[in-house]
Amino acid sequence: MQIITTRKVNCKDCHRCLRVCPVKAIGINRGRARVLDDKCIFCGKCVTECPQHAKRLISHVPAIQAAIASGRKTILSLGSSFSGLFPEYSTSELVSAIKSLGFHQVEETAVGAEAVSLLYRNLVKNTAQTVISSNCPVIVNIIKKYYPELTGNLAPVVSPMMAHGQIIRQRFGQDAFIVFAGPCMAKFSEHNEHHSVDAVMTFVQLRQWLNRQKPEQKQIAAAPYQSEPLSNARFFSLAGGILKSFMNFDLLGTEIIAVDGIEECKEVFGSLARGEISPRFIEAFSCKGGCIGGPAGGSAQPMPVRRLKAIDHANSVEQQVVRQLPQGIDFSCEHLPEAVTVAEPSEEEIKEILHQSGKFTKVDEKNCGACGYNSCREKAAAVYSGLAEIEMCMPYMRSKAESFASIIVEHSLNGIIAVNDKMIIQEINPAAQQMFNGKKIMEKGDSLAGFIDCADFAAASNFGDKVISKRIEYPEYGIVTEQMIVGVPEHSIVIGVISNVTDQEKRMQEWQKMKEETVAKATDIINKQMQVAQEIAGLLGETTAETKSTLIEMMQVLKGREEQ
């Protein structure tokens, strides 16, 4: 199952995820983005930066709830960065609130960090090559995929999450359901690879669950840890904290490097790969400030505030005692390279793709980054690999749109005139010039008032009036027009779209004349028919009277004979 998915209905032509992705692990198809798992380092930037919330992180919460409901002993390993990310709770209140959700026990992941710090101490002491901390899964992913030659430099040690999961399993048994909660999205990928814990939950997901449950205040009482870290392991969540946990660290030293932030880490790894530096140990965090800057921390507090709270929490350990490594647990971890392979187009293929987006010279390559890539050539290579589209180039699409608009205006049968607030013509197309073809041709820079009455244009400019389908005659030009005039205040111009309806008017007049002539002819015919009908009726009346008179006489004659 994918760790980060995209809701396609919310994603269209933004490219912001591609812009913020430090390794460009985003593919674009028909304007919509998708995360490429084989290239992704799961830093979570695409999720947090998506303005439409189209990127969704997987959730193990339903599985956790199902485990609790089934009666399994469910243990939570709580990342130590919680102290700087849950300001609404004290430590004991948070532990109690989490237990109210059904968890059997809550422990701090720093218990696992204790074991990891002991291993780091021995490793740095006994290894000649540079050692890179392996506690941050994003860093592990970056090196395995993008600096595979440095995979051997990664500390062959599990992360604190994995170490703590193994410790909990040893204490509570194989049937225990172990959950890790922290501010890191990459823990899901680590969980998929190493099953030291059964489920992962971000602090954002945990807070949402707590808010839905809304435990009553009386339930939130002091609830101590069952196993509490005793050394400096709580500092593991802070930039510089790993070093503090197992050695005296001098910021000005040359054998130790502490770096946080993906771009800064990439710079250090690049220098190490090129042999420009060779420190004994590199503490690397992908997030600024360490885990307290994690993408799924859910805290709106400023970074300095989070850091101070996390430091106070770390210093609250009463006994600075270093325990021994738990017996019977293998904390080693083999890191294997997973180098990302990228198809390399030839120079001719790059140029062909650049030409498709209107880039024929170096000057045409703006390298603006609007598409999400750092350069036009990088984007062309992505197009070659099927990860990007020609239409992602904003300058090209803008130029294309402007070109289309110019073509439409240029070839429109309607006259189009744009004037500024002083009625000076800013744009005019050939159709308008043809309509008002008098002694002088109307051109850009001329005053519209010198050619036609521009009262409607002025009203649109000054008062925002609109003219819709208004009939205006220009006897001096021998035309009748129908006009639409609208103002565009943000650009301080007024646009007039003018249709020449002279021929239509002539046809209408001819049609009207034809109708009138037809009506007159029909009326004349009807009148004549009425006259004929009347004449026929008169003749029929006379003949009917004569017939009646004759019949009466015949009847009288016949009656007289019968009486004789």
Image (cartoon, helix red, strand yellow):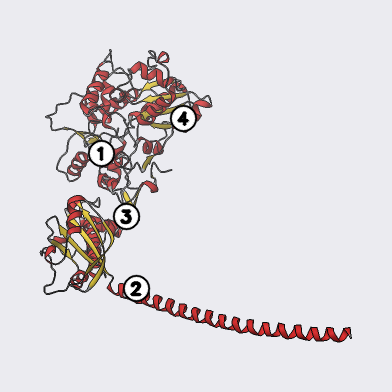
Q: What residue lies at 39% left-to-right and 45% top-to-bottom?
A: 7
Mark 2 or mark 4, which is nearer the start of the sequence? Answer: 4
Q: Nearer the viewer, mark 4 or mark 2?
A: 2
Q: In this figure, which residue is indicated by the disc labeled 2?
A: 508
Q: Nearer the viewer, mark 3 or mark 2?
A: 2
**Quadrant position of the N terminus in the picture:** top left
Q: Is residue 40 above or below residue 133?
A: below
Residue 300: percent from left, percent from top: 27, 29
Q: Is residue 30 above or below residue 72?
A: below
Mark 4 or mark 1, which is nearer the start of the sequence? Answer: 4
Element carrying mark 1: helix
- Location of residue 279 (image quadrant): top left
Element carrying mark 4: helix
Residue 498: percent from left, percent from top: 24, 65
* Residue sitting nearer the eye, 33 or 404: 404
Element carrying mark 2: helix
Left or right for 31, reference 132: right
The residue carrying pointer 4 sits among few (fewer than 14), some (14 to 19) or many (20 or more) residues within 10 Å by Cα, namely many
Q: In this figure, which residue is indicated by the disc labeled 1?
A: 153
Report the amino acid beneath label 3: Leu
Q: In this figure, which residue is indicated by the disc labeled 4?
A: 64
